Image (cartoon, coloured by chain):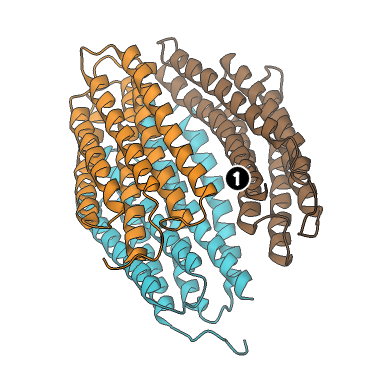
Chain colours: A orange, B brown, C cyan
Amino acid sequence: MGLRFRPVDSTFYDLFTESAQHLVTGAGLLAEMLSDTSDREDVARRMREAEHAADETTHAIVRRVNSTFVTPFDREDIYSLASGLDDVMDMMDEVVDQILLYEVKDLPTDLSAQVEVIQRCAEVTAAAMPQLQSMQSLEEYWIEINRLENAGDKNHRRTLANLFSGEYKAMEVLKLKDIVESLEGAIDAFEKVANTVEQIAVKES
Amino acid sequence: MGLRFRPVDSTFYDLFTESAQHLVTGAGLLAEMLSDTSDREDVARRMREAEHAADETTHAIVRRVNSTFVTPFDREDIYSLASGLDDVMDMMDEVVDQILLYEVKDLPTDLSAQVEVIQRCAEVTAAAMPQLQSMQSLEEYWIEINRLENAGDKNHRRTLANLFSGEYKAMEVLKLKDIVESLEGAIDAFEKVANTVEQIAVKES
Amino acid sequence: MGLRFRPVDSTFYDLFTESAQHLVTGAGLLAEMLSDTSDREDVARRMREAEHAADETTHAIVRRVNSTFVTPFDREDIYSLASGLDDVMDMMDEVVDQILLYEVKDLPTDLSAQVEVIQRCAEVTAAAMPQLQSMQSLEEYWIEINRLENAGDKNHRRTLANLFSGEYKAMEVLKLKDIVESLEGAIDAFEKVANTVEQIAVKES
């Protein structure tokens, strides 16, 4: 990679990694929430904690950008990446909240496939964050996120077709559609993070 | 505060104050719309007028940014603040519109608590705008908005749980959920304005 | 127009024109989708192709911005315009997708009026793109888009009032409301494109 003319401040990479690890936690809680045997109130409480912890990390990144003279990449890109990761957490938190508030009895099994895509997105993102320092292997990361987003899109469309097949009552569709769309929103939010990383990598190359 | 190195052009502060005062008007109309005895068509007409007046103020700010060489703070922050205030108005206008178009007969009393939060947000925001000039007491403003946003979030969740409790028919839920979400959208839009003000204050400090 | 101090790279204008022409194709497919006699699966397949072609054009614009030293207008404005045009396509694609997935039997005739507005928006936008080079007659374009947006808004409100008039069952409302809102989303996306063009024209004048 040759010389870097900006001094290396590894804190940013650590904070982005921390931020993405909150997403791994969140995705795990989402999977728990879907299980028949889970204590939903308890999972929702832990999700709230994870969301607060993620907020803390986001604020730490913003504070650091504001107080650091030389940043490892453009300030606006750091903001985008930090708020992009935060958006994923908000979407996952929303799903858990909806399942709790709507008191959905039977979640269609389709949803598990979508949560698996989300868990995989979280793992791949968490593994990519430390690589921002060397800018190595990032292309594999965003290619994999695009592949996962395509798989998620297929799940989403199949679930919607199912939901409107006549099997469900309007009230159930009303509840489930919100949940299904928030799940898709989480995957879209992961894709936005990958797009931001791609933009950063293009600028730095 | 010591010396300011930028010449003071107080027009911007006046325009932001004007913009926030339209929100106080809008929030009042929202409260009227919810009352049992209101003439909904008439309230909606006045809301439309208020929304046009707010648009005028937004355009005046944008024109002034484009024709002024030295602005009191960064151009993009002025745009963000102006469009953020405008977004609040659009959300309030949407609520009034939905109540009119959906011909909702009985609005749950829960909604009044949320409209009170919105009215308080509007007042606090209108009081904060003139303080942009001295950059004094702004922290109290955004802390209060955050507190209101938390209260609004609790209202929102209680209303949703209520809506899905089985008391309402699917058709009513369909209508009310839209209204409830637009109300929450208005509060979120106030929070975004407060975040923009915080960012401006951090840069200027 | 006098001297231009930036060398003229006409490729950008060609690419924006190409991008807007994809929208004309998409709007035509939308109209086909609404017809009683159409093969919906086939229209949806062709829409997917048009959407991919539009993506290609968007990427070509982004690649060109990244590899060109002097651009005909600000880099961020080129991004905004490219992604704004792309957003219109995504909204039109979403409508087609919803009609297919939700298996809506009888589409209200109201929707045709809205699709006509969209077709007209697409034509006007495609005609305006080549004019970016000379910056001539652009005002007529954004005035026409605003007029169309107002007409679309009236259609939208009439359709919603209709949808909630009691004639439709909750399940039908649930499906149709999504479609109706995506149609409005497409028109809003055209308006955003026009706003971006207006901003560019103001800067260049």
- Residue C196 x/y as whole percent: 54, 63
Q: Residue at x 25, y 36 (%)?
A: A118
Nearest the eye: A55 or B110: A55
Residue A183 in the image: state x and y as whole percent. 30, 34
Q: Which quadrant of the figure contains the C terminus of chain A?
A: bottom left
Identified by mark 1, the residue type is Gln
The quarter in which the N terminus of chain A is drawn is bottom left
Using the image, name the chain to which the residue with label 1 belongs: B
Compared to residue B38, the image places residue B98 above or below, namely below
Q: Nearer the viewer, residue C67 or A16?
A: A16
Q: Which residue is mark 1?
A: B199
Q: Nearer the viewer, residue B205 or B188?
A: B205
Residue at the (73%, 50%) spot, across then down: B57
Residue A101 lies, in percent from the top left, at: 39, 17
**Residue A185 visible in the snapshot:** no
Residue in view at x 73 percent, y 67 percent: B69
Which residue sits furthest bottom?
A: C3
* Left or right of C15 on screen, residue B52: right
- Please identify the quarter of the rendering in which residue C53 is found: bottom left
Q: Secondary structure at mark 1?
A: helix
Number of disc labels: 1
Residue B198 seen in the figure: yes
Q: Toward which corner of the image does residue A43 lie, by quadrant?
A: top left
Q: In screen coordinates, is A33 left or right of C180?
A: left
Q: Foreground residue, B202 or A140?
A: B202
Q: Is residue B74 left or right of residue A59?
A: right
Would you call the spot at circle 1 few (<14 residues within 10 Å), some (14-19), or many (20 or more)?
Answer: few
| Residue at 25% from the left image edge and 27% from the top image edge | A28
Give the x, y percent position of residue B2. 80, 49
